[in-house]
Structure formats: C-alpha cells, structure tokens
Image (cartoon, rainbow, N blue to C red):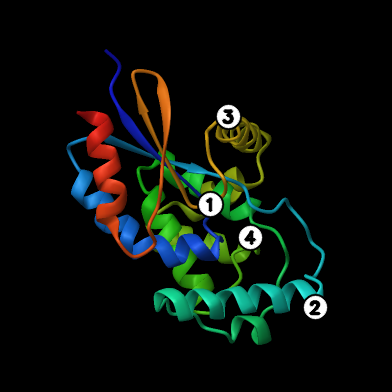
C-alpha cells in the first residue's frame, strides 16, 4: 500500500496563503509523523517586467484590507507606496523549488511572505529573493545561478502541470493522496481542526 501524503498547494506571494499561514502551521504540526507533507507551488502570475496597472494595485491592496479585516492578518501597506509592484510570482515560486532541494522550502516561503507582507520588499525582484536565500543559509551565488536556469524552469513547469491535475479551486489548497486517490480537503482559514477532522476520517 502506498504511503498517504498531504499536498499543500500555495504560492509564496498569494495573500490568502499568508492569511492562512498561522492555521496551516498548526495543522502541519498536528499532522507531524501521521502523514507525509509536500509543498507544491501553484504559480499565480507569470514572469513580467511590466509595472502593475493602477486598477490591479488598488484591487490587491483592497484584498489585503479584506483579509486583515476577516482574519486579523498583519500587512505593511507601505509596499504599495515604496515598491514598484509587478504581477509576477513565478520567480518566488522558483525560489521555493531551489530551497526545497536544501530542505528549506518552508523557511524560504516564510522569508518571502515576511519580506513582502511585513517589510514592504518586492519578491518579484530577483535581488530580493537572492538576499532572502542568503538569510536562510543558502549559497548566494549558487542560488542566483539556479534561479534563472533552464533546468529549474523545466522543473517548475512540470510542477505546474502536476498541480493542474489536482482537485483544487485556487490557493491555498489541500489535497490528501491515499491509495493513489486524490481527496480535496476543505480549508477553514481560522480553524485547523476543520481540515484535520476530514483528513483523519479519510485516513481511518
């Protein structure tokens, strides 16, 4: 019988993933040793050097306010004034894949989220990602070379293709794989027990 695993599908620059992170970390901790956990990046927005249009900036800042009101999540709104936002999350996703190989994916994702949402830094910029990689103990030059490599981009594209086969609606999403069957797990943004009960009932 194949081992069961829980797949967490996210994007490091997805604001709802940031809102969900405290609940996700509690759920993950509760499941430690019971089920294997895998992170998969969803790739919210393709590579782009174009400045984000004003209407999109306003829409996304509004989303931050909405998440903060609903969940109590902290955001640093100076990002919208101090940075030049671009609708581009693929670089941050690739950074997560590099960190995964070093067993530091969760650390990299947390570093990206803190830089973006609390410190008003832009993870669409390679310079930000390189600095964060160094902070979590990755080799700066090696990380920088990998970030733009064809090999990494091929791995990333393969991951996006796999994620599209999963029964998900958006990010964040949870999918439990048991006996090669994929079960979508509903999320409650503030109550980790909600997902845990579903997972436990399927694993029985």
- What secondary structure is found at the residue carrying circle 3? loop
Residue 159 drawn at (x, y percent): 57, 34
Residue 53 drawn at (x, y percent): 81, 72
- What secondary structure is found at the residue carrying circle 2? helix
Question: Seen in the image, is 201 located left or right of residue 42?
Answer: left
Q: What is the C-alpha distance between the residues marked 1 and 2?
A: 24 Å
| In the depicted structure, whether residue 74 falls above or below residue 102 | below
Q: Specify few, some or many for label 4: CA neighbours under 10 Å numbering under 14, 14-19, or 20 or more.
A: some
Residue receiving disc 4: 126
The earlier-in-sequence mark between 2 and 3 is 2
Query: Is mark 3 in CB contact (under 8 Å) with mark 1?
Result: no
Residue receiving disc 2: 54
The earlier-in-sequence mark between 4 and 2 is 2
Residue receiving disc 1: 171
Q: Nearer the viewer, residue 70 or 134?
A: 70
Residue receiving disc 3: 165
Q: Residue at x 25, y 57 (%)?
A: 26
Q: What is the C-alpha distance between the residues marked 4 and 2?
A: 23 Å
């Amino acid at each position: 019988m194949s081992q069961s695993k829980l797949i967490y599908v996210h994007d490091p620059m997805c604001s709802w993933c940031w809102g969900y992170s405290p609940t996700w970390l509690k759920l993950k901790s509760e499941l430690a040793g019971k089920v294997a956990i895998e992170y998969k990046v969803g790739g919210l927005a393709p590579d782009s050097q174009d400045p984000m249009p004003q209407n999109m900036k306003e829409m996304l800042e509004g989303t931050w306010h909405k998440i903060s009101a609903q969940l109590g999540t902290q955001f640093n709104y100076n990002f919208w004034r101090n940075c030049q936002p671009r609708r581009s999350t693929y670089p941050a996703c690739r950074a997560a894949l590099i960190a995964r190989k070093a067993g530091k994916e969760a650390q990299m994702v947390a570093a990206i989220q803190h830089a973006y949402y609390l410190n008003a830094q832009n993870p669409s910029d390679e310079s930000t990602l390189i600095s964060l990689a160094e902070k979590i103990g990755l080799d700066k030059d090696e990380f920088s070379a990998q970030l733009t490599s064809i090999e990494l981009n091929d791995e990333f594209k393969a991951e996006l293709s796999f994620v599209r086969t999963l029964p998900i609606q958006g990010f964040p999403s949870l999918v439990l794989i048991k006996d090669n069957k994929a079960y979508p797990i509903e999320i409650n943004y503030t109550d980790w027990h909600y997902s845990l009960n579903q997972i436990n009932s399927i694993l029985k």
